[in-house]
Amino acid sequence: MTEIIKVLGPPGTGKTTTLLNYVEEAMLTTDIKKIGYFSFTRKAAEEARDRAVKKFNLEKKDFRWFSTLHSCGYHCIDLEGRAVMQKEQFKAFGDKIGFNMSSVDSETGISENFYLNEYALARARGISLEEHYNKYSDSTNINWKQLSYVAEAYDAYKETNGFIDYTDMLYEAVNENLLPHLDVVFIDEAQDLTPLQWAMVEHFATTANKLYLAGDDDQAIYRWLGADVERFIEYNGKEIILPKSYRLKKSVQDFAQSIIKLTKNRIEKEWEARKEDGEVHYHQVIEGVDFSQGNWLILGRDRFILKKLEDACREQGLWYEKLERKKFTKPIAKRVFDAIIGWKELSEGRAVDKKTLKKIFFYKQTKDYFQDEFDKLNDNHLYDLDTLKVVLGPFSVGTWLQALDKINIQDRAYLIRLNDGSEDIFATPRIRISTIHGAKGGECDKVLLATDMNIKTYSEYRKNADDEQRVFYVGATRAKEELHVLLPQTNMHFMLSI
């Protein structure tokens, strides 16, 4: 009989550390090769593995079953001459049927293509495509005939060309009973599992000696990816609630609790905040927020809201980076930034290579003969400013704002505002802009939380508030020191209990 333990970890309560302590305890009587640790994202799984490697003085290869559930499926099946669908194959498939196709996220199985995405969600939920369409799809944007055509064509393409995708791996591993038989299993972020992933959990619940289900139903924000938080809430097991947050101060906890307590279906949890009071501030407009000191995380519900927040940062001359496709990028193109860095190097008397010079002179006004002379430069040599004036002839100098005179007017205006202020564009930005979903698992000293939504989100919120209460709870609980709440700017917004 499998012993099932539910570890409930409110924000900042050290869930990963607690689980690794349980791993250490299990290693006293169990070979590490018979211990599995599976998480929702690759980042979380690798973090747990790397911390375990350091803590237990072992090598990465020893932790074979520390991975995502998708990766577990991949390692269980025999590809038998098949290959995994990659970016090139998705593009080829799209070209074949006349659709623009992007690759599929290996962690979620989700594509940016509407139709492929809907098919992936139907499979993740373990229901027919027609049932999924009738229950979940937006029929104003998704046409049933096109959806069924894409799904059939996609399966035919894979079968004809010998490809499988990440969801296929999970289905095969579950249906053909290929999942590993482990003694102790840890499932982290269990509130975010889809029905298909829950089928993997059921395997471990009947084959392992001990199963830890760790998560927090209050932070379940991935229903749109097929997550079934109700399964986590209702799952029977011994409950352990981690009692103290090492992140949240009292006033931030109080604000967050005022949000989540309105959620109808949840597990009640008692936990302590840090002793300090902390700060919660409300702002009518973003211009009223003083961003001049400290590290900031600016959070919006969706990309539509983020664009407005980003525009406000540019208008105020704030140096920031924003989350795009799981990576933080600076607000000006990398080529512009590299040109500025390169010109700064030249101006300070250092030499740079031809590749850097090409970026610099792309943004400089030059004479007609310049390109011919530039092409003669040696790819392997370094050139300083004095040498370039001799080899290429005269050109404008000065600060990078003066010298790089072909930077577009929008970026130029922004860079001038930065230059007039106290921001250092050569330093790592103090300010980050992200969706709430993108910031899950993160934290920051100061957080600005915008309360507006787009029309689609607001419509769903009006029908069932629970999911959005969880989203804004997650946003509020990223704050370590100060939480700043941007009050509604539109008629479509989250309702605050203030």
Image: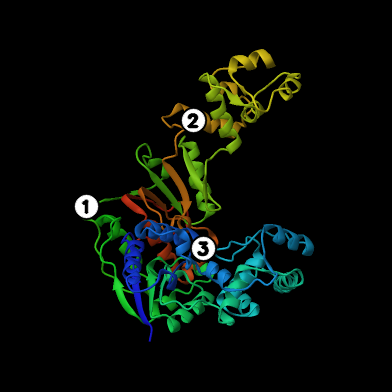
- Helix, strand or loop at label 2? It is helix
Residue located at (39% from left, 69% from top): 215
Residue located at (62% from left, 32% from top): 408
Q: How crowded is mark 3: few (under 14 residues within 10 Å), some or many (20 or more)?
A: some
Amino acid type of the residue that numbered disc 2 sits on in the rendered structure? Arg
- Residue 136 visible somewhere in the drawing: no
Pinpoint residue 376: horizontal percent, then vertical percent.
73, 22
Amino acid type of the residue that numbered disc 1 sits on in the rendered structure? Glu
Q: Is residue 278 above or below residue 26?
A: above
- Pointer 1 residue: 276
Q: In which quarter of the image is the N terminus?
A: bottom left
Q: In this view, does 131 lie above or below 449?
A: below
Pinpoint residue 239: horizontal percent, then vertical percent.
31, 76
Pinpoint residue 346: horizontal percent, then vertical percent.
55, 21
- Pointer 2 residue: 417
Q: Which of marks 1 and 2 is in front?
A: 1
Q: Most extreme residue toward the bottom, as rendered? A: 1
Contact? badges 3 and 1 (CB < 8 Å): no
Q: How crowded is mark 1: few (under 14 residues within 10 Å), some or many (20 or more)?
A: few
- Pointer 3 residue: 457
The mark tally for this picture is 3
Compute the Cα span from label 1 to label 2: 37 Å
Nearest the camera: 4 or 303? 4
